[in-house]
Amino acid sequence: MATVSLIDIHAHLDMLDEGPAATIARAKAQGVDKIITIGTEPADHDFVLRTAKEFYPDVYCTLGVHPHHGAVFDSSVEASMRPHLRDREVVAVGEIGLDYYYEGAAAHVQKEAFARQLALAEEFNLPVEIHTRDAEADTIEILQEYRGRVRGLIHCFTGTWWLAERCLDLGYNISFSGVVTFKNAEDLRATCKKVPLNRMHVETDAPFLTPVPLRGKKNTPAYVVHTAQFVADLHGIDLAVLAAQTNENTRQLFPKII
């Protein structure tokens, strides 16, 4: 595996067994120079903020409430997020969106939390990291309301080409995780081939979705190089070319990243 400079745009460092220092060192040894660690609920916001502040500029973070926890997003949670959204380490509002597969919160509750957090991103001129699963039509309907007002990406994309095409049209980028390497992901690979390189990102979603050939191990940001290599091969380009392009895409979308 060639060593190149990569950015893991989506990892949950709070869910890894080893501490952030060890995770970062292991990632750097594979050429993964920067990591965005993700806020998903009020309970992890303190961790992601502290970790990003301690390891800046190698680690950045997002703040948001995942659709599974949509019921907890209220005015007090919003108020707790607001003082930090201008912090240099906080690069996006996320992880936000809709998930009707598990439906940890009722659909109408998820939609309200999603829309309110999109409005927060607009107010603070921040991009968003979006989670969507089995909720394609509703995701597009809500994003249409914020067309031209909020930018961002669809993280860990596993949807249809219909969803990808509409998200691209709305100005959102697409991020691929280890899922694209899975044996049964033929449709996703077909979609990946269609996504323009200048609208693409790679990620781990660590500790989940470990890419081939490391299935069975807990995912970690160091492994994003395997997903990047796989995507580069799909597009018929060198890993270094893909890495340079996805890094540029990331810095364009998240201008706080240095």
Image: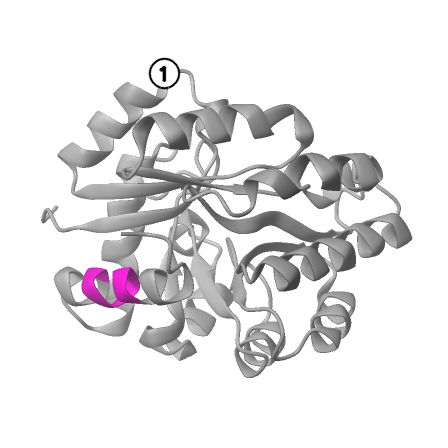
Which residue range is magenta in the image? 243-248
In x, y percent, where is residue 89?
Answer: 41, 41
Q: Using the rendered image of the protein, determine whether residue 25 is visible from the camera's viewpoint.
A: yes
How crowded pointer 1 is (Cα within 10 Å; few <14, some 14-19, many 20+) is rated as few
Out of 35 and 195, give the one closest to the viewer: 35
Residue 35 is situated, as x and y percent measured from the top left of the image, at: 34, 41
Q: Residue at x 68, y 60 (%)?
A: 118
- Magenta-colored stretch includes residue 109: no
- Residue at 49% in and 30% down: 48
The main secondary structure of the magenta stretch is: helix
Q: How many marks?
A: 1
Q: Is residue 216 visible?
A: no
For the residue pair 69 and 232, the one nearer the viewer reads as 69
Specify the amino acid type for callout 1.
Answer: Glu
Q: Secondary structure at mark 1?
A: loop
Q: In the rendering, at what x and y percent does residue 26 appear?
A: 22, 27
**Residue under circle 1?**
18
- For image coordinates 35% across by 67% down, the residue present is 252
